[in-house]
Amino acid sequence: MSKLFVLLMVGMLVVSASCSFGGRTFKKTYELLDAKEAKTPSWINDPQEWAEDNDEKDFKDFRYFVYDTEAKKRRGIACQLARAKGSAEIASEITQFIKQSFGQSVQGDPTQNDDALEEYVETTLAQEVQSFIVGAKVYRTYWEQRAYREKKGADKDFTGYTCAALIKMSKKNIARAIRRAQRKLESVANPETKKNVKAALKDAADKFNELDKKN
């Protein structure tokens, strides 16, 4: 029996089967059978803070993202998926940030309706942003083997692997991606809305890159 497996089993006996976050308690639907590391790495929950302490050379010039897969039958498939989906996760976060920034700027103003722009934002923007992602690199991975149990609340009994990937991308490349997305939005918008797009996304790249920054 491996030392890692023993450590995991001891941890499961000592720690309750529930996890507490911010005063709320969530019951796990699985038993942890094995893992890449004896302790879940902190970058999974707070990649920026982890990078500040563990990637000092690049921290100021990069942002960090995490993609975590659902359980798969094979560990290799789970981790391959986590690595492959890294760019999509970055694109998703950028897209949500753009939607939120633009949405707040026109909220409650019926004169700013632009059907073509709205359709583009809802159906095409995420795909466009993903094509703008350049230079994203997988920096760390972490996998777990889990036995999901109906008695714990899972949909069915099964054993599978999950895998998380920590991805880093330079702030310069992120800024380029956001500026390219902004230009696409401006090209789709009608003349009346175009100025609102510019105003809403002014300094958007800088603001996105400063998210999660400690004061």
Image (cartoon, grey):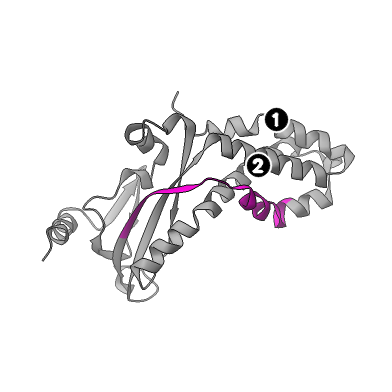
Above or below residue 15? Residue 151 is: below
Q: Which residue is mark 2?
A: 98
- Judge whether residue 67 can be spotted in this image: yes
Q: Is residue 125 magenta?
A: yes
Q: Residue at x 88, y 38 (%)?
A: 192
Q: Quadrant of the N terminus?
A: bottom left
Alpha carbon distance from label 2 to label 1: 11 Å
Query: Along the horizontal axis of the image, is 2 left or right of 25?
Result: left
Magenta region: which residues? 121-143
Three-letter code for the amino acid on which mark 1 is drawn: Lys
Task: Give x and y (percent) for residue 204.
Answer: 64, 33
Three-letter code for the amino acid on which mark 2 is drawn: Ile
The crowding category of the residue bearing disc 2, from other C-alpha atoms within 10 Å (few below 14, some 14 to 19, many at least 20), is many
Task: Give x and y (percent) for residue 123.
Answer: 71, 57
Query: Along the horizontal axis of the image, is 42 left or right of 69?
Result: left
Above or below residue 7? Residue 177 is: above
Task: Give x and y (percent) for residue 3.
Answer: 12, 58
Task: Determine the secondary structure under disc 1.
Answer: loop
Q: Quadrant of the C terminus?
A: top left
Residue 166 or 154: which is nearer the viewer?
Answer: 166
Going from N to C along the chain, the mark reached first, 2 or 1, is 2
Task: Tell me which corner region of the image, top left, top right, bottom left or bottom right, holds residue 32.
Answer: bottom left
Q: Is residue 178 magenta?
A: no
Q: Residue at x 55, y 54 (%)?
A: 88
Task: Tell me which corner region of the image, top left, top right, bottom left or bottom right, holds residue 83.
Answer: bottom left
Above or below residue 51? Residue 72 is: below
Query: Along the horizontal axis of the image, is 102 left or right of 162?
Result: right
Tags 2 and 1 in contact by the CB under 8 Å rule?
no
Task: Give x and y (percent) for residue 12.
Answer: 19, 58
Q: Which residue is mark 1?
A: 202
